[in-house]
Amino acid sequence: MIFLIIQISMIIKEHPNCTNVLDIVHSNCTKAVEIAHSDCTKAGVTLHSDCTKAGVTLHSDCTKAGVTLHSDCTKAVEILHSDCTQAVKTVRSDCTQAVEILHSDFTQAVKTVHSDCTQAVEVVHSDYTEAGEILHSDCTEAGEMLHSDYTEAGEILHSDHTKAVEVVHSDYTEAGEILHSDYTEAGEILHSDYTEAGEILHSDYTEAGEILHSDCTKAVEI
């Protein structure tokens, strides 16, 4: 408990601009109801330095309103880059939100989010397009990934990809379960430093629903 209080004090002292209530604020992020990268501004939306349209992020390689077409672009209800975010989730590799575990290439409550791949209910790699579909050069069919290592509509069996309600890593089996060497049981992530679905117990973290990494903080728990 004493260590926890000291750690919190150190976080606040070390990152004086990481204080906003109800969100997780990276050391160079400030915006009230979201996590904004150092060059993101618009209220309620994450706007990377070359993004513009309110409600949609339009990176230099991104175009269609309501759809994200680049690995570091974002849309209001999705997270598409390790340093971009939306109001109720964080996808920075060392940040997280209460009901999600976001290890560097894992997870959101019911899905797996690679460090630079994600969309609200699917995985969107940098060369995918079209809302609701994954169209990698080796993938076909809306809602399915058919990469050379993938099989079966609705399942993804590549090493670092995923589909909405299941995680099927090359070492995983069974839709809805994660059976990597350090993982067990559908809906739970049990990495060597983690226990129990919904809790993160990494060496710098404490207690379910709280994350106290050296440069991350969540004000409702502190």
Image: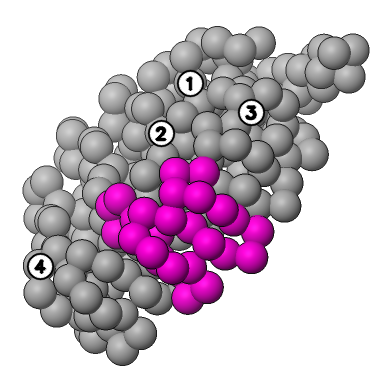
Q: Quadrant of residue 25?
A: top right
The mark lying in front, picked from 4 and 2, is: 4
Instruction: Give the alpha-carbon distance from disc 1 to disc 2, as whole Å.
Output: 9 Å
Looking at the picture, which amino acid does disc 1 mark? Asp
User: Do the numbered discs 1 and 2 sit on residues whose CB atoms are within 8 Å?
Assistant: no
User: Do the numbered discs 1 and 3 sit on residues whose CB atoms are within 8 Å?
Assistant: no
- Total of numbered circles in the picture? 4
The residue carrying mark 4 is 142
Mark 1 or mark 2, earlier in chain: 1
Looking at the picture, which amino acid does disc 2 mark? Lys
Instruction: Give the alpha-carbon distance from disc 4 to disc 1, as whole Å.
Output: 34 Å
Looking at the picture, which amino acid does disc 4 mark? Ala
Residue 75 percent location from the top left of the image: 24, 43
Mark 4 or mark 3, earlier in chain: 4
Residue bounds of the magenta highlight: 163-188
Residue 29 percent location from the top left of the image: 53, 30
Mark 2 or mark 3, earlier in chain: 2
The residue carrying mark 1 is 23
Which residue corresponds to the image point at 26% horizontal and 46% vertical from the top-left? 120
Q: Nearer the viewer, residue 122 or 130?
A: 122
The residue carrying mark 3 is 211
Which residue corresponds to the image point at 43% horizontal and 56% vertical from the top-left? 177
How many neighbours does mark 3 have within 10 angstroms: few (below 14), some (14-19), or many (20 or more)?
Answer: many
65 displayed left or right of 124: left
Q: Quadrant of residue 141?
A: bottom left
How many neighbours does mark 1 have within 10 angstroms: few (below 14), some (14-19), or many (20 or more)?
Answer: many
Which residue corresponds to the image point at 37% horizontal and 27% vertical from the top-left? 88
Which residue corresponds to the image point at 67% horizontal and 24% vertical from the top-left? 207
Residue placed furthest toward the bottom: 148
- In the structure shown, which secondary structural element does the residue marked by tag 1 occupy? loop
Mark 4 or mark 2, earlier in chain: 2
Instruction: Give the alpha-carbon distance from disc 4 to disc 3, as whole Å.
Output: 36 Å
